[in-house]
Image (cartoon, helix red, strand yellow):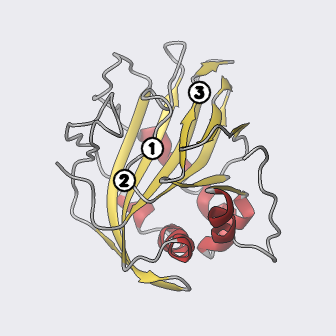
């Protein structure tokens, strides 16, 4: 895992790259194609990150994270978009074995804005990724948790992953950059879960995605610091799990 796999849009799919190395970086145009839209459809979502409520569960005492959270179930298979249903609103929960800082507690966040969920491209994005993941690991259902995050630097430092390098306890993770404004830092790091190799890079272009096989790699993003007033980093994180949502 000493270099980013460079795959042809025509010759190789994100699923093939995931099978070969456990992660892949998907450019914005390719992600939009996968969702069946253009990047301008994604751009229409960006103002919704300006109204995220604060995350009141941060155990490090910080006030730098804002978020919303909703859950979905994707029924389908590789090569078929299948059906996407929004699940009843529920708490986000992880065991302490995967999140030592925030695990073991039910965290209730405000749901994602219905306008975003109903917009063109949302179903295409979630089902398109689900079909790619199903090519790597067969699944009758994907239990999807969608998280909108804003990490700001009003207090000087913002921490995208205060829990440190981690796995999420799911099958696959998609980390999608939405915006990066007036900050430095925020280096994404992906490491083999059972080996010495890893890679570091900075996501800079909106709607670039990193897809991760959660069993094979661990990941983190380093803290950000402001270059100007209002510095922030916005992401959309989607997790896919077989066998149901994580729960106590």
For the point 63% across and 70% down, the residue is 15
In the rendered image, residue 216, in percent from the top left (x then y), is placed at 54, 52
Using the image, determine if residue 229 lies above or below residue 189: above
- Decide which of 70, 132 is in the foreground and name it: 132
Query: Is there any visible trace of residue 38 in the rendered image?
Result: no
Using the image, determine if residue 179 lies above or below residue 241: above
Q: What element carries label 1?
A: loop
Question: Label 3 belongs to which residue?
Answer: 222
Residue that sits furthest to the left in the current view? 248
- Check whether the beta carbons of the residues at disc 3 and disc 2 lie within 8 A of each other: no
For the point 28% across and 36% down, the residue is 96
Could you tell whether 205 is left or right of 112 in the image?
A: right
Using a 10 Å C-alpha cutoff, classify the residue at mark 1 as few (fewer than 14 neighbours), some (14 to 19) or many (20 or more).
many
- Check whether the beta carbons of the residues at disc 3 and disc 1 lie within 8 A of each other: no
For the point 21% across and 52% down, the residue is 247
Using a 10 Å C-alpha cutoff, classify the residue at mark 3 as few (fewer than 14 neighbours), some (14 to 19) or many (20 or more).
some
Nearer the viewer's eye, disc 3 or disc 1? 1
In the rendered image, residue 124, in percent from the top left (x then y), is placed at 53, 74
Question: Label 1 belongs to which residue?
Answer: 167
Sequence order check, earlier mark of 3 and 1: 1
Nearer the viewer's eye, disc 3 or disc 2? 3
In the rendered image, residue 61, in percent from the top left (x then y), is placed at 33, 16
Using the image, determine if residue 197 lies above or below residue 248: above
Nearer the viewer's eye, disc 1 or disc 2? 1
Q: Which mark is residue 112?
A: 2
């Amino acid at each position: 895992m000493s270099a980013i796999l460079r795959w042809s849009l025509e010759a190789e799919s994100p699923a093939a790259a995931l099978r070969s190395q456990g992660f892949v970086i998907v450019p914005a145009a390719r992600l939009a194609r996968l969702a069946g839209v253009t990047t301008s459809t994604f751009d229409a979502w960006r103002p919704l990150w300006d109204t995220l409520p604060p995350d009141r569960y941060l155990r490090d005492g910080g006030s730098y994270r804002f978020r919303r959270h909703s859950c979905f179930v994707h029924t389908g298979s590789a090569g078929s978009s299948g059906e996407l249903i929004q699940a009843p609103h529920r708490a986000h929960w992880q065991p302490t074995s995967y999140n030592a800082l925030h695990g073991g507690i039910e965290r209730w966040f405000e749901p994602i804005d219905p306008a975003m969920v109903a917009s063109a491209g949302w179903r295409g994005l979630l089902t398109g990724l689900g079909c790619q993941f199903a090519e790597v690991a067969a699944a009758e259902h994907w239990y999807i948790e969608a998280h909108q995050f804003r990490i700001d630097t009003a207090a000087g430092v913002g921490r995208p992953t205060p829990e440190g390098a981690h796995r999420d306890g799911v099958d696959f993770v998609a980390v999608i950059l939405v915006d990066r404004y007036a900050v430095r830092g925020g280096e994404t790091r992906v490491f083999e879960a059972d080996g010495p190799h890893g890679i570091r890079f900075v996501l800079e272009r909106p709607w670039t995605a990193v897809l991760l096989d959660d069993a094979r790699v661990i990941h983190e993003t380093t803290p950000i610091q402001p270059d100007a007033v209002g510095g922030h980093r916005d992401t959309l994180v989607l997790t896919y799990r077989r066998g149901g949502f994580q729960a106590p």
